[in-house]
Amino acid sequence: MKVLVTGHHGYLGSVVAPAIADAGHDVTGLDTFFYEGCDFVEEPGPVTALRADVRDLDSSDLEGYDAVVHLAALSNDPLGALNTELTLDINFRATVELARKAKDAGVGRFVFASSCSMYGSAAGNEYVTEEAPLRPLTAYAESKVRSEEGLLELADADFTPVFMRNATVYGVSPRLRFDVVLNNLAGWAYTTKRVLIMSDGTPWRPIVHVRDVAAATITMLTAPAELVRAEAFNVGANSENYQVRDLADIVRDTFPDCEVEYAEGAGPIRGATASISGSSRARSRTSRRRGAPPTERASCGALSSRSA
């Protein structure tokens, strides 16, 4: 399969793109390379790359590809708060336009990196499945909801959009992010011997390892189209739901001589997300029906929503 991976030089992409290539596919990456030279570790296996903004692509640029894995985005809430319209322009409008051009070019599959943040924060301890109401609380989450809605309209027998609602990702990547919760706490511990929590520690966070997102992406690329077309899949695991204070304790126990500290005046954070739990729904649609092995630490699943 010939695959174009947008945002291949970012935190997710620099792990996902080589993993797809290692699975035997012909991979081309596309990125603006804003973080060129900011490598944390050596890249596992560089792929053929194009330097471009996804907003500037034409249908002719997408001809010959079997699939697009769309990771490129402004990818956190502070950026969305800084400029909501720019976030919607890049994350929503450019996503739908890219998919429309891909469909015109004959691309058969469009794997979209969505987010579990679109569920917002709900009360109770019931599992939140992919059919749960969407309650985006930030511009970033709103952009993901609107993108899924736009992509759904493009789905037909010849074009298969599929949505990966990823938990909060953690783990080492050549372009490491320290703004995501577990990486952030580990960064504080390593550099300062303090595990600094900016909230009161009660918000729940679903987490998933970056390599498991890569494995799930490969599943979404290769699953029979009739099983995944226009479907959303939460990507996480039952065992990886934590309150922030529990993550802090794990980090403290991992790094010697560290202490957990709470920022002055810390309280619950608005927009705290639900927590991920692996469900039979996604496994039945991908793994069990196809005989595929599970990922190392995670599965496509449902969300367990707990209030902050």
Image (tube, rainbow, N blue to C red):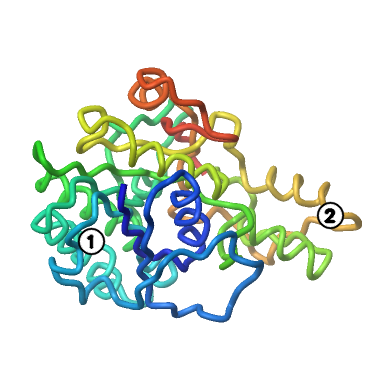
Q: Position of residue 80 (x, y in %)?
A: 36, 69
Q: Quadrant of residue 172?
A: bottom right
Q: Secondary structure at mark 2?
A: loop
Task: Please report whichever mark, 1 or 2, sits nearer to the chain's N-terminal start.
Answer: 1
Placement of 205 over or under 190, stated as above or below: above
Q: Position of residue 124 (x, y in %)?
A: 45, 30
- SS under mark 1: helix
Nearer to us: label 1 or label 2: 1
131 horizontally vs 197: left or right: left
User: Could you tell me which residue is drawn at 28 percent across and 54 percent down?
Assistant: 68
Residue that mark 1 sits on: 95
The spot of residue 105 in percent (x, y) is: 12, 58
Residue that mark 2 sits on: 255
- What residue is rendered at 84% in x and 57% in y? 259
Which residue is at the front of the view, 240 or 132? 240
| Residue kind at label 2, given as amino acid type | Phe
Asked which quadrant contains residue 121, the reply is: top left
Q: Are marks 1 and 2 in contact (CB under 8 Å)?
A: no
Q: Is residue 76 above or below residue 50?
A: above
